[in-house]
Amino acid sequence: MPREIAQLLLNGLMAGTILAVPAIGFTAIYAVLRFPNFAIAAHLTIGAFAGWLANVSLGLPAALAVGVAFVVAGLAGVLNDELILKPLRPAGALTTAIAAVALTLVLENVVRFVFGNDLRGYDLPIRRDWQAAGLRIAPQQVHNFVIAVVAMAAVFLFLAFTRTGKAMRAVADNPMLASVKGIDADRVARLTNFVAMGLAGVGGVLVGLDTSIDPLTGFRVILSVFAAAVVGGLGSIPGAVVGALTIGVGEELSLLVLAPAYRTVVGFAAILVVLTLRPRGILGERAY
Amino acid sequence: MENYLVAMAVFAGLYALLALGLNVVWGMTGMINLGLVGFFGLGAYASALLTRAHRAPIVLGLAAAALVTAAAGAAMALTTARLRGDYLAIITLGFSEVVRLVASNELWLTNGTDGISGIPGPWRGRVTPQTFNVVYLAIVALAVLAVFALCQRIRSSPYGRVLRAIRDDDQVAAVAGKRVIVFKVQAFAVSAAILGLAGALWGHYTSFIAPDVFTPLVTIYVVLALTAGGTGNNVGAVLGAALVIFLMEATRFATGWVGMLKPVQVAALREALIGGALLVVLRVRPRGLLPERLARS
Amino acid sequence: MPLLDVRDLRRAFYGVTALDGVNLAVRRGTITGLIGPNGAGKTTLFNCVSGLIPPDAGRVIFDGVDVTGWPAHRMTARGLVRTFQIARGFPRLSVLENLVLYGARQPGETLWRAVARPPSVARRERELRHRAFDVAERLNLTPLLDMPASDLSGGQKKLLELGRALMTEPRLIMLDEPIAGVNPTLAARLAEHLRALRDAGITFLVIEHHLDVIARLCDPVIVMAEGRHLAEGTFAQVAADERVQAAYLGRRAATA
């Protein structure tokens, strides 16, 4: 039993790390643009399919496919925001949130129109699991884990050390002050969308490498993504990571008591518990 | 053809109920419900299970559906009442997925993805299908009329005035002396009850429900109906519902003519059109065909 | 006994202190001014006293009753109502609805009565409408009653704010910058209204940056700085106070 729990913990940390990637995207858009952008689901799917095309049709290795997914989903994110969501933002955060759901429906069906409903898998070598101290781990899991960590590290470095990254944080902290300081809010919004939706796209590839993809891939994981962001504190990027690890581990541990189909319910339950007990999330929502 | 038109009128009526229900929260109170299909589904299952497995009368099933969904709605509104609306958006969207998951997996209760068939309908089997159709249309029309009257009464009362004040600024509403949380929770419960009632009526009409019926697409249909008709306006909600049914059916025929597409592509095209229509309406005519009007002194 | 008594009120936001133990009292029948440099904590004080945000520590006593941490709707029912700096309100309600909404004890605001409509609903609605007509008459808002509040000018919105506050049968009205953005003619008229209302028995606590208005209207004047009570007296007294001058100047020197 302790070994089984240790195995679930290990799996949960791996899954949580992958989940953290799109969760950072969701929370970053929230921090800068102040609305829950549900279209993160569609961009996750777009990234998954872009990566799949790169990997299966062009024969690129998975690591390069991740890059392709980032760029394609990021550009799609900027385009969709400029054309569709940005003009609606003056109508309010909730109206924009509704539009984001409609946008997701459109994009998801564009993918379905082109690729159909079939499940697709990435081209991966089949390798034996590694074993150590009685714990099993698949090389692919480690591979995905590394991709996720690298992607997150890149984001942290970008936010911490580049001018643009600092500008993004300034807008997230206090949009009024940022505009006084001459930071171009539109540019920051575009960049945020690019990075956030790019991360969603990377998340899509990671899901694809882990299992398989179809037009609903994004929608299926979105509940866990929300949960990660809310549990960690909406708008807080370190919070999204902590939240994602919490949800990842929680979903795995739930296998001890719940049917596998209910994994995603854990996320919903976690949202309810956190909102009841600690409404601003584990690390606290950004105040301003 | 006649049967088809009657059936479409029934569906338009059911969508009118959904749009009226959404209007109570989104149109009047400014609270979002992105998972209204979850309440719709919950109501459908509650009534179907009660009337089919326990042979309860249909009226009791409808009442139970309204009660169960009202309780679920109240719980959600209560959890998020003190937080910004974004949280309610996330929670309701999550709720609808949970309803679908439970419906898909609790085989003993819901028969899983195969769904529940043989849900009783009033006088079904004892009259011809044509007569049943017409009778049901009358029942749905009655329900729409009753709910419409209820919503109009709420809207035009001092109670509705508070709801509209909360929609504009809930902090100032509190300073105006209103217990905002009570109004929010009640409004959400009333709205959820209407959605649940619509779900129950749906099941008793089609005699079959399955998790597939309750996809996020339905939520978009209803939001589209209300937005196109006129958010905040009960007449607009009913009109918008009729329009959406018309649009859905029109696209069905339109895509039927495009011969070289595969069925999955036709389906994708229709769904994309619905989503696109909502985006266009939000952009071009955000207040709808019948914009909400101010009360006169 | 003062009408409003604030004792050692404290509030911090995410580690930043906004109120650092404020002590102040508002005497009955006064128009008390509240001034201080930006960031002195005036608006936070309003928020804590009016029940929009709970204080971390300290006490608020209104008319002899400890009302610390009461939510806004209970404060209003008790007779303490506030207005907002940037005219906030209900843009999609008509001016009349804006006024009537603020009326207390409305039976039509319970769900079942809203639907069943017993006679008490219409009776109270009639009373409140008459009250609203009176208030509108007093504030020269009568021709605007059917307009959506969003269509009013900045000055008219300020009048409407005052009118809404009057609808609650208040004993203390806390005004957050009632003159800001209002043209001089209307400002003078607003000041007239406030004096007349004070003579009718309503007490005011007024935040205002236009010191000339404070000088003409308010007595006493309370000065806050850095989340504390700094000085109090007639306008002339506080204006002559070196600590007050230093607080204003220091602020200016720091931001310049």
Image (cartoon, helix red, strand yellow):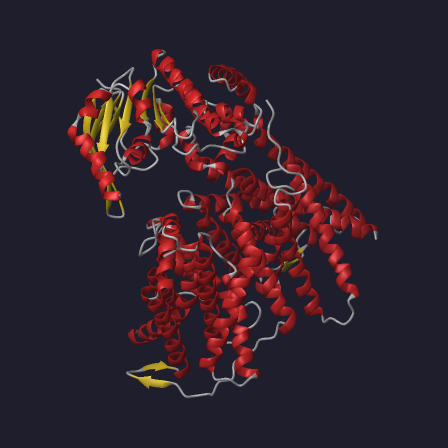
Q: Please identify the residue farthest to the right as the structure is shown.
A: B1
- The total of numbered circles placed on residues is 0
Q: Residue at x 30, y 26 (%)?
A: C211
Q: Please identify the residue farthest to the left as the structure is shown.
A: C242
Does the image show residue B38?
no
Residue B21 image position (x, y, % from top left) = 59, 42
Which image quarter holds the C terminus of chain C? top left
Q: Where, by quadrant of the figure, is residue C251 drawn? A: top left
Q: Residue at x 47, y 68 (%)?
A: A198
- Residue C208 versus residue A97 in the image, above or below: above
Which image quarter holds the N terminus of chain C? top left
Q: Left or right: B172 with respect to A110?
A: left
Does the image show residue C53?
yes
- Residue B273 versus residue B232 in the image, above or below: below
Q: Left or right: B116 with respect to A97?
A: right
Q: B181 and B102: which one is in front?
A: B181
Q: Left or right: B251 with respect to B292?
A: right
Residue B58 image position (x, y, % from top left) = 64, 45
Residue A200 image position (x, y, % from top left) = 47, 67
Q: A194 and B264: which one is in front?
A: A194
Q: Residue at x 58, y 56 (%)?
A: A102
Residue A42 image position (x, y, % from top left) = 54, 64
Q: C219 and A220: which one is in front?
A: C219
